[in-house]
Amino acid sequence: MNAKILGNLGETIAEKYLKKSGYIIVCKNFRCPIGEIDIIALNKNSLVFVEVKTRTSTKFGYPKEAVTYYKKNKIIKVAEAFLAFNKKYANCVFRFDVIEILVDPKTFKLNNINHIKDAFTL
């Protein structure tokens, strides 16, 4: 399975998990010239920008470790662009979460999901 398909699988798993947890999905794969945010959702009174990382093993580290300083800064800039395009969310409290997903390398079924709330800040 190539990285794009694996990433899409992880995002689908994360979306189902968030919905089951009471989140309302606002946008998936928000793109702008700066980059992309995987999922944007409402949770109670917070707008949540979610980065999803999916792997089939931890051989090269946990998925969350792929959210580097550079990646965090990029996500923050994309979030700012989203807020500029969507004025109705401008006064919302917001946070940045990471959802790391491990799937079985043979069956691609979910092995583990770890939702890291408030994973990083501005």
Image (spheres, rainbow, N blue to C red):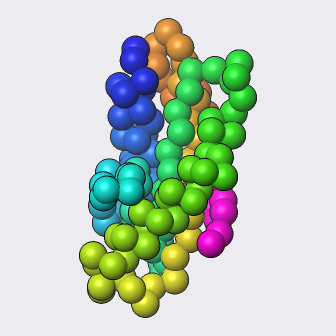
Of all residues shown, which one is farthest toward the front?
33
In the rendered image, the quadrant that contains the C terminus is bottom right
* Quarter assignment of residue 26: bottom left
Q: Please state if 64 lies on the left or on the right of 46 as rendered.
A: right
Looking at the image, is 107 positioned above or below residue 54?
Answer: above
Q: Is residue 42 visible?
A: no
The magenta span reads 113-122
Q: Is residue 122 above or below residue 52?
A: below
Residue furthest out toward the top: 106
Q: Position of residue 78 (x, y in %)?
A: 42, 63
Q: Is residue 10 visible?
A: yes
In percent of the image, x 50 and y 9: which residue is there? 106
The residue lying toward the viewer, choosing from 58 and 36, is 36
Q: Nearer the viewer, residue 90 or 77?
A: 77
Quarter holding residue 82: bottom left
Q: Residue at x 65, y 69 (%)?
A: 121
Q: Is residue 33 above or below residue 68?
A: below
List x then y, in percent, for residue 107. Answer: 46, 13
Q: Nearer the viewer, residue 67 or 106?
A: 67
Q: In the rendered picture of this protein, how many numbered marks are placed on residues? A: 0
From the viewer's perspective, is 6 left or right of 119?
left
Question: Which residue is located at x 60 percent, y 51 percent?
Answer: 70
x and y percent of residue 109 in the render?
47, 23
Placement of the N terminus among the 4 image quadrants = top left
Magenta-drawn stretch contains 65: no
Q: Nearer the viewer, residue 60 or 24?
A: 60
Is most of the magenta stretch helix, strand or loop? strand
The quarter of the displayed image where residue 80 is located: bottom left
Q: Residue at x 69, y 33 (%)?
A: 62
Query: Measured from the top left, where is residue 34 in percent x and y?
Result: 38, 57
